[in-house]
Image (tube, rainbow, N blue to C red):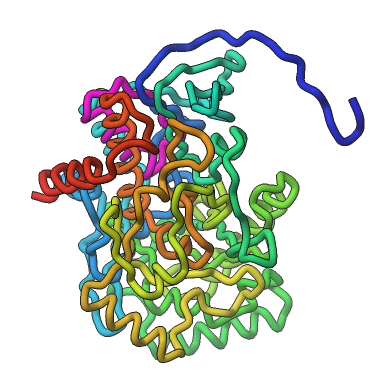
Amino acid sequence: MTSKQYCEPARHLPVLGTFDVVVCGGGPAGCAAACAAAAHGAKTLLIEKDGYLGGATVSQLVCVILSTNGVDCQGIWHEYIRRLRRRDAIRPFSAPGAYGRISSTVDPEQVKYVWDELLAEAGVQLLHHVYGCAAIIENGAAKGVIAETRSGRLAILAARVIDCTGDGIVAAQSGVPWDQGDGEHKYAMALTKIFRLGGIPAAEQWPDEAAMEEVARRLAAAIERGEYTAPIVTEQQRLLRYLRGRFGVLPDARHEMLSVISRVLRVDPLDPFDITRAEREGREQARQAADFICRYVPGFARAYLLDTSAQIGVRSSRRLKGLAAVTAEDAVEFRKYPDSIARSSWEIDVWPADSYAAPAVDTTTQQWRDRCERLLAGEYFDIRYGCIVAKGIDNLLMAGRCISAEHLAQSSLRIQQTCMSTGQAAGAAAALSAQAGVTPRELDTGVVVRQLEQDRAAAEV
């Protein structure tokens, strides 16, 4: 043992069970993957570190649904939305306008129940408070997962493993190569501590544009008096812009809104000290922003800070290496491929990691205007099958924001409906390859593409 390294002793681990497919991570990608694998006859286990399903939608309060043209909303996403509507747990979608977006918000509490229903109906076995930390590798192939539980470290055996952890933890710890950052720094994008306000006023009580001018004056005066020091609050225009647009109002029954005003800069999300600093800094930014709104914005006198997200929002960390990769050119030029297993039609949405004020989407260039016009006309780019198949290790797939992609492409495909699509594809491929007796790498991509087309057509009715 040295101060820099400790050699962990070898030990025998109890085997928790044996499955056809084990999915690590219960967010949008993992839940979709588990449902798809089970729907195709695979004995499927989903393991989730938290005590609920929903991933970033719940733990990070990413309750906003965004799209430009809707063509990225595929397959299981439609059933997910239907279940939310039955529970009055989603706002009506806004219609896209010029350079506009389709948008909505969901009730994060009801998201838990919707995924519980869908997984139970599919026959997925589920374990909460279980943390997948690495795949079991034999002869270059995944044979299961090593998992940390409250009873200790256990082994879970499986013919196929799917990493949907967001951070690519299982694949990376198993030896799959990966990238991080923007090409120069370990940080790729700013992190955000989302907060919710309860007791917000009804729509007719929100300040109008004239009243917002007074709000701006009050904010400037409060900053001048030294009442607020968080950089994201002193960067006044972003805070006021979110209020003007009534961004993040949750379904009516909740009388709540969320705010994504927080930005924590220059964070390596894989460094335990850095991510801890980000949690604390983001929480303070949220507290100061909420305090100003409740004290100085007309109509919000009875509002209150309901909560901050249990986990700070991480937009990008590891990007795992696959048999193929989504390139920046794919995203910018809307490239299509015959082995496509998912679509992405969101903007190139890089939240600057070194600026509180710079926009996430550059709306000033002709290139952006041209791309936006094409998006509004229905354009998208394809995600190829090889982008969800791990490089160098057989029987290991990945889905969600950690799939094989370059930085700019990942900033678009990290949106939740695209994560569901890559998850559904990974789950189907895991089950189909196991049934065919071939590795996911050897599986005929045409089989996967045709099966997904059939499955998604049925779900979209």
Which sits in the foreground, 398 or 237? 398
Which sits in the foreground, 259 or 218? 259
Query: Which residue occupies the extreme right position in the image?
Result: 2
Above or below residue 134? Residue 234 is below
Residue appearing at x 28%, y 83% in the figure = 373
Query: Which residue occupies the extreme left position in the image?
Result: 461
Residue appearing at x 18%, y 45% in the figure = 450
Which sits in the foreground, 361 or 443? 443
Q: Position of residue 357 (x, y in %)?
A: 59, 79
Q: Position of residue 223 (x, y in %)?
A: 67, 79
Residue appearing at x 35%, y 56% in the figure = 383
Specify whether residue 188 is painted magenta.
Answer: no
Q: What is the quadrant of the N terminus in the image?
A: top right
Q: Position of residue 4 (x, y in %)?
A: 87, 36
Specify whether residue 41 is painted magenta.
Answer: yes
On the question of residue 428 being in view, the answer is: yes
> What is the number of callouts on the image?
0
Q: Which residues are magenta?
A: 23-45
Q: Position of residue 170 (x, y in %)?
A: 55, 34
Q: In the picture provided, is 100 more to the left or to the right than 133?
A: left
Q: In the picture provided, is 222 more to the left or to the right than 8?
A: left
On the question of residue 84 being in view, the answer is: no
Q: In the picture provided, is 277 more to the left or to the right than 416?
A: right
Above or below residue 205? Residue 48 is above
Above or below residue 236? Residue 88 is above
Residue appearing at x 25%, y 59% in the figure = 91
